[in-house]
């Protein structure tokens, strides 16, 4: 099992991969690809990141709602608290089973 912070990172990778399927400038696409690459650290392997499939619309909506809960002055803590809540994370895994497969590939 990986730490909740790494779980949140896997969730974000799914959202970023969904965004890559949209209309983006070269700069935006590069930023997303760099963010995905930066997720490869600690126990999170390149194979785990590669296994993650893009988020579905409902998955993306849950993450968007968590984003709205955060403000710049709180450092994003409410956002991560929501994503790292076991029930929320389990629901996200049900919506995107590739997250579970990615966790199995983490070192």
Image: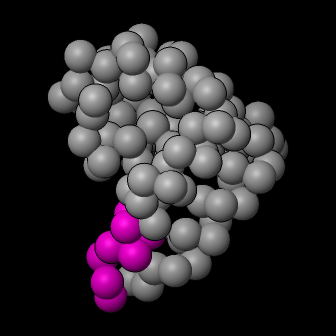
Looking at the rendered structure, the number of numbered marks drawn on it comes to 0
The residue depicted at 76 percent of the width and 41 percent of the height is 56
Work out whether 99 lies above or below 73: above
- Percent across and percent down for residue 42 are 19, 28
In the rendered structure, does residue 78 fall within the stretch colored magenta?
yes
Residue 30 in view: no
Tell which of 1 and 34 is nearer to you: 1
The residue depicted at 50 percent of the width and 49 percent of the height is 89
Tell which of 4 and 43 is nearer to you: 4
Work out whether 50 lies above or below 28: above
- Percent across and percent down for residue 72 are 39, 83
The color scheme shown is one colour
The residue depicted at 30 percent of the width and 48 percent of the height is 4
In the rendered structure, does residue 32 fall within the stretch colored magenta?
no
- Viewport quadrant of the N terminus: top left
Residue 105 in view: yes
Q: Residue lying farthest left?
A: 42
Residue range corresponding to the magenta coloring = 73-81
- Percent across and percent down for residue 54 are 68, 33
- Viewport quadrant of the C terminus: top left
Work out whether 91 lies above or below 1: below
Tell which of 77 and 3 is nearer to you: 3
Q: Residue lying farthest front?
A: 87
Secondary structure predominantly adopted by residues drawn in magenta: helix
Tell which of 75 and 91 is nearer to you: 91
The residue depicted at 25 percent of the width and 41 percent of the height is 3
- Percent across and percent down for residue 55 are 69, 40
């Amino acid at each position: 099992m990986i730490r909740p912070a790494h779980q949140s990172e896997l969730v974000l990778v799914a959202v970023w991969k969904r965004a890559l399927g949209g209309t983006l400038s070269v700069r935006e696409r590069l930023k997303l690809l760099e963010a995905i690459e930066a997720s490869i650290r600690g126990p999170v392997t390149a194979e785990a990141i590669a296994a993650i499939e893009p988020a579905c619309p409902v998955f993306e909506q849950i993450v968007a709602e968590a984003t709205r809960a955060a403000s710049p002055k709180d450092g994003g803590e409410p956002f991560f608290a929501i994503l790292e809540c076991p029930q929320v994370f389990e629901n996200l895994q049900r919506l995107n089973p590739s997250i579970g497969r990615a966790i199995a590939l983490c070192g």
